[in-house]
Image (tube, rainbow, N blue to C red):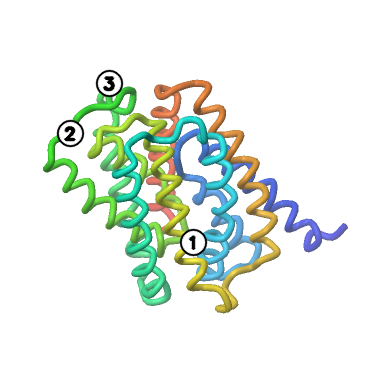
Amino acid sequence: MTWHELQPVAVFLVTFVASAFSGMAGGGGGFIVNPFLIALGLTPQQTVATAKFVSFGLTGGSILAFRERMLQNKRFSLFIIVLSAVIGIIASLLLRKVDNKSLQLLMGIITLAMVPFMLKKARGLKSTKVNQISKVLGAISLAFILFLQGILSGGIGSLVSAIFIVFFGTTALEANILKRKASLVLNVVIVVSLLGSGLINYKFGFFGMAGGLLGGYVGSRIAIKNGDEFAKYALLVFMVVSGVWLVVTA
């Protein structure tokens, strides 16, 4: 078989590995998948669109793994879903008009700047009460980061999880669940807006979705088995790697 014929299989394998890591850490798989798609010849815009399509597999696998640990705070979950839908609509309208390189550098700097806040010993290991100011700042930060996640090619998903931990006082595993819900709604809105645009490579997309489904499930089950401490430090590792990657490649 030629390399061209093996490319979809390679997409499946790379996405499986990236999604397994992302499932453990609560984000960050995009910095593996997206450069690989570009290396296969996709343009940056095709990469963004195809990666959003692929992400349905990762999100679905993670949510399936977490199905028995869904959050009890239905109002907060509903807020996240509505916010993600609104941001998804805005991001889909501006996706082709934004200077991604400048935003990518900004996101890398923000991701690395958040690392010290995550190092507090108890943070992410147990749910903590936060004041109203923290929640407001968290909502503003989350809206901004979700917008950038919607228009950038990837690598910043771990920052969404960090915001849930730092500003909303969730555990690392709770942050992982919330991040998956937000990403699902955000990417559904964006992908629907891109249908018929010619930007989504469906051959790579479906193979990547299958790899993401399996990898997301495996990674999330590993995170659940090892608990919040494992999930927290897996997230920290991915934040450092993602932040450096975003800055270097900007």
Would you place residue 165 above or below residue 101 in this image?
Answer: above
Which numbered disc covers residue 121? 3
Please tell me how crowded label 3 is: few (under 14), some (14-19), or many (20+) other residues with Cα within 10 Å. Answer: few
Q: CA distance from mark 1 to mark 2?
A: 31 Å
Could you tell me the amino acid type at mark 3? Lys
Q: Which residue is mark 1?
A: 188
Q: CA distance from mark 3 to mark 1?
A: 36 Å
Could you tell me the amino acid type at mark 2? Val
The quadrant holding residue 175 is top left
Upstream in the sequence, badge 3 or badge 1? Answer: 3
Q: Position of residue 18 (x, y in %)?
A: 57, 43
Upstream in the sequence, badge 1 or badge 2? Answer: 2
Q: Position of residue 132 (x, y in %)?
A: 13, 41
The quadrant holding residue 229 is top left
Horizontal placement of 1 versus 156: left or right? right
Q: Which residue is mark 2?
A: 130
Could you tell me the amino acid type at mark 1? Val
